[in-house]
Amino acid sequence: MSLAAETRRAVRAEPFVFEALRAGVLNYSAAARQLDVGAVEPVVAALRRYAEELPDREIASRNARVTMQSGLAIADDTDEDGILGVGGNGVVDGGSLTGVLATGEVDAAALARVCSRLATEGIDIEAAGVAGDALVVVVGRRDGPDAVRTVEEALAAVATTPTD
C-alpha cells in the first residue's frame, strides 16, 4: 500500500482528523505525528493532497421537534413496546432515566452529531437510536434539561456533505 493510501486509511479511521481535514482546520504536522504512518513530511504532503480532493464541509439545520420524557429505565430481555429497543433489550417506563426525543428531519448523521455534542458536554448516554423520523438519546435524570438544549443545538448544525 502506498504512503498516500495508508495516510487516507488512517485519516478515515480517525473521524476527528477527517472532519478537521474537511473543515480546513487541521494542523498537518500534528496530524501526521498522530496518525503515525510514516515520516512526518511525506505524510503532511499526503494529507494536503487528500484535503484538496475532499468536498467542503457543509452544515445545515434540521427541522425537528425536541421533547423530553422522564421516568425511563433500560430493561433486559423485554418484549414490551418502549421508546427504543435493540436485541431484546429496551428503554421502558419505570426508572430514573430521561429520554430526549427528536422527531422530524433526523437520520444517522443527526444522531452522530447529537452523540458527539453530548460527549463534548460531558453528558453520558445510556442508550441512543434513530429510525424513520425519530431520534432518541437516553441520559441520566439530572442531565435531561441540558441534554435537550444540546440536542437542539446539535440539530442546528449537521454535516450535509458526503464524507468521502
Image (cartoon, rainbow, N blue to C red):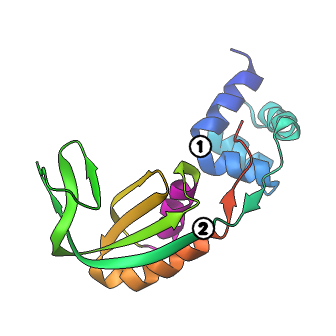
Mark 1, other Cα within 10 Å: few <14 / some 14–19 / many ≥20: few
Residue carrying label 1: 14
Q: Residue at x 64, y 65 (%)?
A: 62
Residue 38 seen from this side: no
Comparing 163 with 62, the one in front is 62
Which residue shows up at 52% across the image and 61% down it?
Answer: 116
Query: Which element is circle 1 on?
Result: loop
Q: Which residues are magenta?
A: 110-122
The percent position of residue 95, horizontal first and vertical second, equals 15, 74
- Given residues 32 and 92, the one toward you in this image is 92
Instruction: Using residue 111 as the reference point, say whether residue 41 is left or right of it.
Output: right
Residue 18 at least partly seen: yes
Q: Are marks 1 and 2 in contact (CB under 8 Å)?
A: no
x and y percentages locating residue 124 in the rendered image: 36, 68
Separation of marks 1 and 2 at Cα, in angstroms: 22 Å
Q: Nearer the viewer, residue 102 or 76?
A: 102
Q: Amino acid at mark 1?
A: Glu
In terms of secondary structure, what is the magenta stretch mainly? helix
* Image depth: mark 1 or mark 2 in front: 2
Identify the mark nearer the N-term, 1 or 2. Answer: 1
Q: Where residue 72 appears, x then y in whole percent?
A: 22, 71
Looking at the image, residue 88 sits to the left or right of residue 19; the answer is left
* Figure quadrant of the C terminus: top right
Tell me the crowding category of disc 2: few under 14, some 14 to 19, or many 20 or more residues within 10 angstroms, Cα based.
Answer: many
Secondary structure under the numbered disc 2 in the rendered image? helix
Name the residue carrying label 2: 155
Amino acid beneath label 2: Leu
Residue at the location (48% across, 75% down)? 66
